[in-house]
Structures are given as C-alpha cells and as structure tokens.
Image (cartoon, helix red, strand yellow):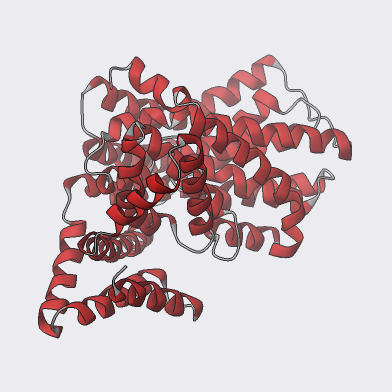
C-alpha cells in the first residue's frame, strides 16, 4: 500500500482515540491524506467537492423526512400503544414482559427507523415496569438495547437508504422488502434467549387480558402500524418512490400525533422540527465526510487491493464471508453505522459480487453486522442510551448481553450462509 494510506489509517485512529467526533475524524484524516498526495489547494478543493457531491443525492432526501416522522411518532404516544398491543399478543406467557419488550422494540424501531429512539421510548416505559415485576434490571436493559436494533433491518430504515447510495444504486424498495425476514429472525432469537432466561429466573406470568380488551388494544395500535403498511405497500405497488414515501410518512405521523392521538401540541412542533434538523445535519455531515474518505480509498485502489488479497488468501466462499463478517463486527465496535456502510461497502461489495452474492443479500449481511456493533462497547451508541435509561453501567450489562450476542451472531450466520432469508421476499415481488 502507498504511504498515503498509512497516513489515512494512523491519523484516523489517533483522532478517534482522543474522542474527536467520528465525522471530524474522517474529514481530517481524509484531508491530511490528500495534502500528502497533492498540493494544498487542490487537496482542500477535492475534499470539499467530494463532501458536497456525497450528499447531493435525491434518494438521501428521504432521510430527513424519515427522521422527522420518527420523532413525531416518538413524541406522539405511539410507544405506549404498541406496548399495550404487544401485551395483548404475548403478555400472558411466562416471562411475558420480556417478549413484550422485544416485540414493542421491533414495532417501534420499524415505525421510527431509529434504534436509539426505540431504546429511549420503549425502555422508558418498559424498564420500570419490568423491574417492578421482579425482572433483573440489567437483563431488561440488555434486552431493550439489542431488540431496538431490529428496526434498522425492518423498514423503513435510513441505513438501508445509505447502503443503496454506497452500493451504486441497489433498489431501496428491494432492500426494504429484504429486511423483514432477517429482522424478524433476530427478534425471534432474542425472544428465545428471553424464554430461557425467564424459565431459569422463574419470572412471573403476565396478566391474561380478555378478548374485548385485547381487541381494543389492537385497534388502538392499528393506526400506528398502518404507517409501515402505507409506506412499504405504496413503494411495492409503485404508487410512490422511497423519497416520496418518506414525505407521506411525515404527513401521516403528524396526523396521528396531533389530530388523532392529540399527544403533541402545535407549540411543540418547532422544538421537534429543530431536533430533526439537528439529527439530519449530523447524519449528512457523516455521509459527506465518509464519501470523501471513500473517494481517497478508491483513488488509492484500496478496494481492488483488498479484493485481490481476500480472493488470493482463499478460494472458499465460506471462509471469505467469515473473514468479512469478522472485520465488520470489529469495525462496528468503534465506528458509527453510517460511515461504516459508506466506507466499507465499496471495499467489500466487489468481493461479494465476485463470489456471486447478490448486493441485496450483502446489504443484509453488512447492516446486521453493524447492528451488533451498536450494542457493543466502546462506541455502541444504543448501548450507552440503554445504560442511561436503566441507570446502570456497561460492565453490569455485559453478562446478560453475552447470551443475547450469541443469538444475534447465530442470526447473522444464518443470514450470511442462507441467501433465501434475505432474497425470498424480493424475488417474490419481482426484484
């Protein structure tokens, strides 16, 4: 490799080690590398151009809309209704509140498109209730943290839009459809661990609700769940694009939260809009900086070098996928999901396609890997949120997390080596 690549890697690691924000780490490391490659003037211009070009995409317009719809859902009383709905479905089983937690996180994560929002909203309701019923506080928090990541696989998901951009235009609709089965598989795995935990710890049986009450709770939750049906159904039917669907999601979330449920007052909207702008700015800065780093990696032929090295190392598809998974799992522990997708998709996707792996399938492998990283120290953002809500520490969470990691890694192995899990639904709908 060229010396400039070593400068890129070393400067990035050094900046990250002194807690410089990840977007700034990426931008500075890229700029330093360019300064060592070309003259200062062209270097600065090139980095600025690549950052601007990186966010100049129509498909990325969906991200701020989905962020806003997620915030509206989070403040609009959706979490409470989804929890009640989940209780009506699985609350009567031994350890029922644990299943309710996972199911509610899956529902809310899918609706909001944010694992952090799901952890905050569902954890804020469920953790005190579970602890009051005798459930272990650290297990509750660990379960919420891991279950919240399923919303990044189950659409609508912002990270799948980012992957579509990084992969060169893989259909967002196909990625959305492909995410259902992997996301459900992870949720079922976590429920399996919760079931074993509930038997060992002898957690109480949840209260059985009558048919009339159950139907009432279902009806209360249906308008919220319809968001996913409207968005994904409209995209599949070709009524609107993913970007147009994101705008429809905002209008529908606004109607639910302000008009139907009346949980948000008009005077609260400016604050919610400001928060959406803040989150969007952070995401777009990450995307712009990451596109700059992706460009310099491509300029130095790093993707080709890694591709040739992996293929030269072994001809076994199983081993190459195992190596890619191990690298992505390691990356997920110290890098945020958005830059990781933007930087490593151009590196590993050519290897995957050379092995005959569909880009849609590889997208599920990559996102599921990085979902595990969100719950893993030292940089797991969802993990920190869960610890804050549960008022506990990462060290105390690690023991219950280990068994949940096993469930997620088993799901990852199945998704990696059984393409049908990711590809069944896209093929069914003609993608």
- Tell me where residue 102 appears, x and y as whole percent: 63, 37
Q: Nearer the viewer, residue 177 or 170?
A: 170
Q: Quadrant of residue 2?
A: bottom left
Residue 145 in the figure: left or right of residue 33? right
Estimate the x, y position of residue 213 in percent, counting from the top left.
66, 21
Viewer-nearest residue: 109 or 37:
37
Please, is residue 378 above or below residue 133 in the view? Answer: below
Residue at 16 percent across and 77 percent down: it is: 43
Q: In which quarter of the image is the N terminus?
A: bottom left
Q: As drawn, is 300 to the left or to the right of 319?
A: left
Where residue 228 appears, x then y in whole percent?
Answer: 40, 30
Q: Which residue corresponds to the image point at 61% horizontal and 46% vertical from the top-left? A: 146
- Residue at the far bottom in the pictured view: 40
Residue that appears at 48% across and 52% down: 328
**How many labels sit on residues?**
0
Query: Is residue 180 visible from the viewing direction of this image?
Result: yes
**Is 244 displayed left or right of 110 in the figure?**
left
Quarter of the rendering containing residue 6: bottom left
Residue located at (33% from left, 50% from top): 308
Q: In the drawing, does residue 37 fall left or right of residue 176?
A: left
Q: Can residue 392 be seen in this view?
A: no
Q: In this view, does 409 lie above or below 361?
A: below
Query: Horizontal and vertical percent for residue 277?
Result: 31, 61
Q: In which quarter of the image is the C terminus?
A: top left
Foreground residue, 359 or 431? 359
């Amino acid at each position: 490799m060229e010396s400039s690549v070593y400068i890129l890697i070393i400067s990035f690691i050094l900046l990250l080690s002194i807690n410089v924000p990840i977007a700034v780490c990426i931008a500075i490391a890229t700029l330093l590398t360019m300064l060592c490659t070309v003259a200062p003037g062209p270097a600065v211009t090139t980095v600025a151009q690549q950052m601007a070009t990186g966010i100049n995409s129509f498909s990325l317009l969906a991200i701020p809309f989905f962020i806003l719809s997620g915030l509206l859902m989070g403040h609009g009383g959706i979490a409470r209704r989804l929890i009640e709905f989940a209780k009506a479905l699985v609350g009567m089983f031994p350890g029922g509140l644990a299943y309710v937690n996972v199911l509610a996180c899956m529902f809310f994560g899918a609706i909001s498109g944010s694992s952090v929002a799901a952890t905050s909203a569902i954890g804020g309701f469920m953790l005190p209730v579970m602890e009051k019923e005798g459930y272990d506080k650290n297990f509750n928090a660990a379960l919420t943290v891991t279950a919240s990541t399923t919303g990044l696989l189950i659409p609508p998901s912002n990270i799948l839009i980012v992957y579509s951009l990084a992969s060169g235009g893989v259909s967002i609709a196909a990625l959305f459809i492909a995410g259902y089965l992997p996301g459900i598989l992870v949720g079922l795995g976590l429920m399996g661990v919760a079931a074993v935990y509930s038997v060992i710890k002898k957690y109480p049986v949840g209260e059985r609700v009558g048919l009339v009450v159950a139907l009432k709770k279902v009806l209360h939750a249906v308008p919220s769940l319809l968001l996913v049906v409207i968005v994904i159904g409209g995209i599949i039917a070709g009524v609107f694009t993913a970007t147009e669907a994101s705008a429809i999601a905002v209008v529908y979330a606004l109607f639910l939260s302000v008009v139907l449920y009346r949980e948000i007052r008009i005077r609260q909207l400016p604050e919610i809009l400001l928060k959406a702008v803040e989150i969007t700015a952070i995401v777009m800065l990450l995307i712009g900086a990451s596109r700059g780093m992706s460009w310099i990696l491509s300029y130095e032929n790093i993707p080709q070098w890694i591709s040739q090295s992996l293929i030269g190392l072994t001809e076994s598809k199983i081993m190459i996928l195992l190596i890619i998974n191990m690298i992505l799992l390691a990356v997920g522990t110290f890098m945020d999901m958005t830059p990781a997708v933007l930087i490593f998709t151009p590196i590993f996707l050519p290897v995957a396609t050379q092995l005959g792996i569909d880009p849609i399938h590889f997208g599920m492998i990559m996102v599921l890997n990085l979902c595990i990283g969100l719950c893993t120290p030292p940089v797991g953002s969802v993990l920190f949120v869960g610890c804050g809500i549960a008022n506990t520490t990462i060290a105390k969470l690690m023991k219950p997390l280990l068994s949940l990691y096993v469930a997620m890694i088993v799901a990852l192995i199945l998704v990696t080596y059984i393409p049908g899990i990711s590809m069944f639904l896209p093929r069914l709908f003609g993608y």
